[in-house]
Image (cartoon, coloured by chain):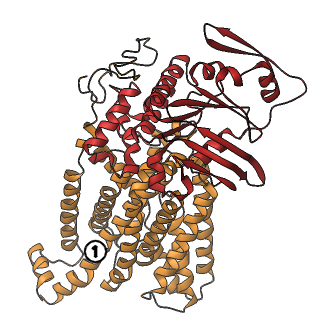
Amino acid sequence: MTELRALGLAVDLGRRHALTGIDLTIPSGRLTVMVGPNGAGKTTLMRTLAGLLQPARGQVTVAGQPVSHMSAGERARTIAYLPQGGTVAWPLPVAEVIALGRLPHGEKPESLPTEGREAVAAAIRAAGLNGFEDRPATELSGGERARVLLARALATQAPVLLADEPVAALDPRHQLIVLEVLKSEARAGRTVVAIMHDLTLAARFADEIILLNQGLVAASGAPGTVLTEAGLAAHFGIQAHVAHDGGHLIVVADRPTPERGVGGDT
Amino acid sequence: MTRNRRGREPRPLRAGSGAPIRGFRDDSGRWGCYPGRVNIKSFMRASRLPLTLGLVLLIGALSLASLLIGPAPIAPVRALTALVSDQGAATIVVRDIRLPRTILAVLVGWIFGLTGAGLQGLLRNPLADTAVFGAPQAAAFGAVVVLYSGLVGALSWVLPLAAILGALVSVALVVAVAGRQATVVVLVLSGLAVGSLAGAGTSLAISLSPNPFAVTEIVFWLLGSFEDRSIVHVGLASPFILVASLLVLAAATGLRALALGEETARSLGVNVMRLRLLLVAGAAIGTGASVAVAGTIGFVGLVAPHLVRPFVGYDPARTLVPSGLAGAALLTAADCAVRLIPSQTEIKVGVLTAILGVPFFLWVIARRKAELSETPA
């Protein structure tokens, strides 16, 4: 079990206290979705979990091992991180971009060993990118590029996969494709965490939801227990209707509550 | 799935085609197991070897030509004999004049091509080059200051060190000002500003000089040339060029990951800070050493990577060595050309590379105008 844990995590960004005391246990084999208003600290938390930000206090552990004690390579093999709105700088072929996910294993794209080749092929299949292998990654649509970058993260075959807004700016079809991939990776035994803003979609796919607000975990658990009308009013500052439709939760944001605005972006 | 080369229509899942997503789950319940084969071998097959070999042969041929071309009328066979055995005056010409300039052209071209490819990879921008950073001007300023202070002669180790310091300050300044999210406009403008400042400093030093003959000499030196260089110059530049090459080549693997942005590169285990240091130091040391012995020669580093990408692809790591070789071939060819162009005095090679390089620079800008207007450097 590659459980991802945050213990008393506090992170300062400059003089701002972005996270103040986060305690989390994120189980493997489940898709955990992180939600929260802008500026709640979602990206900061994810970057800290990925070992890219040093916490002021507390620590992150994967399967009991502190991330801060890992070498850069070991960390990269343990945690795959998909940043928000990633780009590809050069018109590299799609398969080569995905093969970059093998770098933490010391495998170079032009000389992948069998294991690496299988991992890349599996990632291409998982993201439905067969036929795209030779296409320059810069000439793809936003949805296709998002799938390529996701496949790059999958190719590392790390036990932990962290994705920052993987479905932002995607059309509904690509949102579903990407979330199906993440869900399937979780089913395969990985620890998968994704940040999302679409609460209905989050409720539909998440096994667990973490609601973050003002640098703290405001609520966590099954979608039905976290996404309540009272909770949304308190933490998102919205009046919302939460409906149940054949086992699915539907969240319709109605209007902002008058007394409270939403904080700045991270 | 049939092999899909570039240009051929890819089969499943085109955006907007409305094609159903096939193979949602396989027997184990895993999603996304698309039937059909995956082709990932095509980019693995692409080998650098033929290009590298071809470039090495080309450099060999051009170096040979460089030993045979010159104002002294020496027959090719005699020139080659003079290189290996004592043939009196011919040996002096070939060994002491033509050989050092050939070696310098190859070395300087190599390091410019290499650092150009490295900087383009670092800034994820095909317009990056030490010349765009104003590094040659800054290096020249460093060297001129040392020369005019009268403390050391033109063959001292202080000269390349001062030039390296100048280049280091300029490249570091531009990278710092342009930053990680800077647009191309910011990048080029900062380079322009730094270059102008260094140019002004050089002009000031020249205008304050009490000796008009020294001024002429320095002005010509600034134009960039391999004329009348000795083996001492080779000895002065080569250790620095070796160090610079090692620094840039050490950054190769990190540059691959950087194609996906800094955050992703870091998550892949790359130390981005170290990568930046390696490339900035490599570029500055290479440029400084080159300028110290050959004056300002620009645009080789800009052009060389573009020449090799059609053959080796866009992976910054695999562009490095071929780009360095292309740079060496380019500069050796240019140095042969200046000796062949009929004129009263020899045309400076720095002038030639600028005359050819600037239109190329403009062409790259024109071709990539649309994307350059939005993408961060």
Q: Amino acid at mark 1?
A: Ile
Identify which residue is drawn at 34% across, 83% down: B235
| In front of the other: B368 or B13 | B13
> Secondary structure under badge 1?
helix
- Give the percent coordinates (x, y) of residue A216: 74, 40
Snapshot quadrant of residue B90: bottom left
| In front of the other: B313 or B371 | B313
Q: Spot the residue most to the right.
A: A259
- Give the percent coordinates (x, y) of residue B279: 47, 63
Indicate left or right for A188 with A217 as reference: left
Tag 1 residue? B103
Q: Spot the residue most to the bottom.
A: B151
| In front of the other: B262 or B234 | B262
Count how many numbered circles sit on residues in the image. Answer: 1
Say whether residue B321 is visible: yes
Q: Is residue B281 above or below residue A69?
A: below
Q: Is residue B137 above or below residue A180?
A: below
Chain letter behind tag 1: B
Quarter occupied by the C terminus of chain A: top right
Q: Spot the residue most to the top.
A: A246
Q: Is residue B291 above or below residue A12?
A: below
Indicate left or right for B256 with A214 as reference: left
Q: Colour of chain B?
A: orange
Q: Which chain is red?
A: A
Identify which residue is drawn at 59% across, 70% down: B198
Q: Is residue A165 above or below residue B247?
A: above
Say whether residue B347 is visible: no
Identify which residue is drawn at 55% across, 88% down: B211
- Give the percent coordinates (x, y) of residue A84: 58, 37
